[in-house]
Image (tube, rainbow, N blue to C red):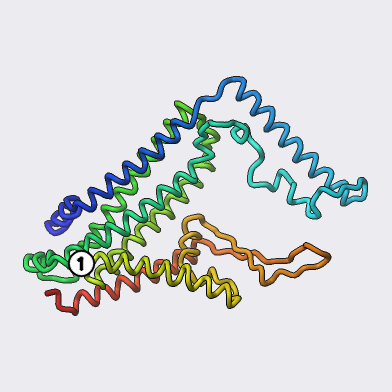
């Protein structure tokens, strides 16, 4: 317990961690201030006009769908409706037009919360990776780990405590930041906007994204810690990240496109990270596209879902962490 408390104090006292927390607050503050400045509470006339336009849009969709069905039955002739009537079926759409779609300059929490949450998770993921890398990298480079081992001469215990403290601290910061961040925008919607439809389905979907996002943040935090442990320096993690993004995500992806590799998205980790965060990511395979009669295409859409993506990312992170622990146990730290 003394070791855990000591590591918590060391983590909180690091200037880089404090700087990242300040940047986190500043980024959130700028986003909130921009949103507040660009929004206003709609007047009664604005609401009335928006409700009328939403009702007209829904009615137009129903008419288009009925016209499509009538054409399929040979009742009428129409050239401007799709061949597949399900494309214009209001009952099959993700959502029908609503009042908020026709309000200009009004922040609607229910409509914007998901994109705001993605921004939050992206920033927390960067925060976790950088803090994780600097936390162990600086100690290894400066000799702080050696001094700690003189007090507690058990390498695996010390490294495991560092990693556990790091993940616990990152999770705590993520939870508090999420509550403050989303709470702030909810208040903005109450004061200078509209809350929107905040039903159980909305909160369930938002909670699922947040939960998967937190897993992604903790995985990237662990990766930063493990790579910095292997490289014995914070810059090793930064270099590895930059090298992977430039060489593989950009360079290799371009080569795979030139070589016409089938489903190249399966070979890059960003696809699996996106699937974990979103729950499901679809990709269009143009190689299966066949043209007939001019401009119709039978291309296939394939998808990655979050369950296999999580298993893959967990496996890779676990393997990298295991290698880092083995290397830390065997090598000379002096």
* Residue at x-position 30% and y-position 48%: 173
Residue at numbered disc 1:
159
- Residue 64 is situated, as x and y percent measured from the top left of the image, at 79, 42
Image position of 267 with respect to 41: above or below: below
Residue 17 lies left or right of residue 246; in this view the side is left
Going 66% across and 38% down the picture, which residue do you hit?
Answer: 97
**Relative to the observer, which residue lies in front, 17 or 213?**
17
Q: Is residue 49 left or right of residue 182?
A: right
Lateral position of residue 317 relative to residue 89, left or right: left
Q: Quadrant of the C terminus?
A: bottom left
Mark 1 packing: few (<14 Cα in 10 Å), some, or many (20+)? some
On the image, the x and y values in percent for residue 233 come to: 23, 67
Residue 212 placed where, x, y %?
44, 55
> Which percent across, then down, holds residue 262?
60, 75
Q: Which residue is at 75% across, 40% downward?
A: 61
Figure quadrant of residue 333:
bottom left
């Amino acid at each position: 317990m003394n070791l855990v408390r000591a590591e918590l104090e060391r983590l909180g006292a690091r200037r880089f961690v404090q700087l990242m927390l300040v940047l986190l607050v500043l980024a959130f503050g700028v986003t909130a201030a921009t949103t507040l400045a660009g929004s206003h509470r709609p007047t009664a006339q604005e609401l009335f006009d928006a409700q009328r336009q939403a009702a007209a849009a829904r009615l137009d969709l129903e008419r288009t769908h009925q016209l499509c069905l009538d054409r399929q039955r040979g009742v009428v002739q129409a050239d401007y409706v799709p061949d597949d009537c399900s494309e214009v079926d209001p009952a099959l759409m993700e959502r029908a037009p609503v009042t908020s779609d026709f309000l200009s300059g009004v922040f609607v929490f229910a409509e914007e919360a998901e994109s705001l949450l993605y921004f939050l998770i992206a920033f927390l993921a960067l925060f976790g990776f950088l803090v994780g890398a600097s936390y162990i990298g600086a100690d290894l480079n400066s000799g702080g780990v050696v001094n700690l081992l003189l007090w507690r001469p058990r390498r695996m215990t010390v490294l495991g405590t560092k990693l556990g403290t790091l993940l616990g601290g990152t999770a705590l910061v993520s939870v508090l930041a999420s509550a403050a961040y989303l709470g702030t925008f909810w208040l903005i919607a109450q004061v200078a906007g509209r809350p929107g439809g905040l039903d159980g389905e909305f909160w369930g979907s938002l909670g699922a994204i947040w939960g998967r996002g937190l897993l992604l943040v903790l995985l990237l935090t662990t990766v930063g810690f493990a790579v910095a442990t292997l490289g014995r320096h914070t810059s090793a993690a930064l270099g590895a990240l930059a090298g992977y993004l430039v060489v593989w995500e950009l360079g290799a992806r371009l080569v795979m496109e030139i070589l016409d590799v089938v489903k190249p998205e399966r070979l890059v980790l960003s696809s699996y990270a996106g699937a974990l965060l979103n729950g499901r990511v679809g990709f269009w395979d143009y190689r299966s596209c066949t043209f007939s009669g001019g401009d119709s295409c039978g291309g296939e859409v394939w998808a990655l879902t979050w369950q296999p993506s999580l298993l893959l990312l967990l496996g890779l992170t676990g393997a990298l962490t295991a290698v880092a622990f083995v290397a830390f146990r065997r090598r000379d730290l002096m």
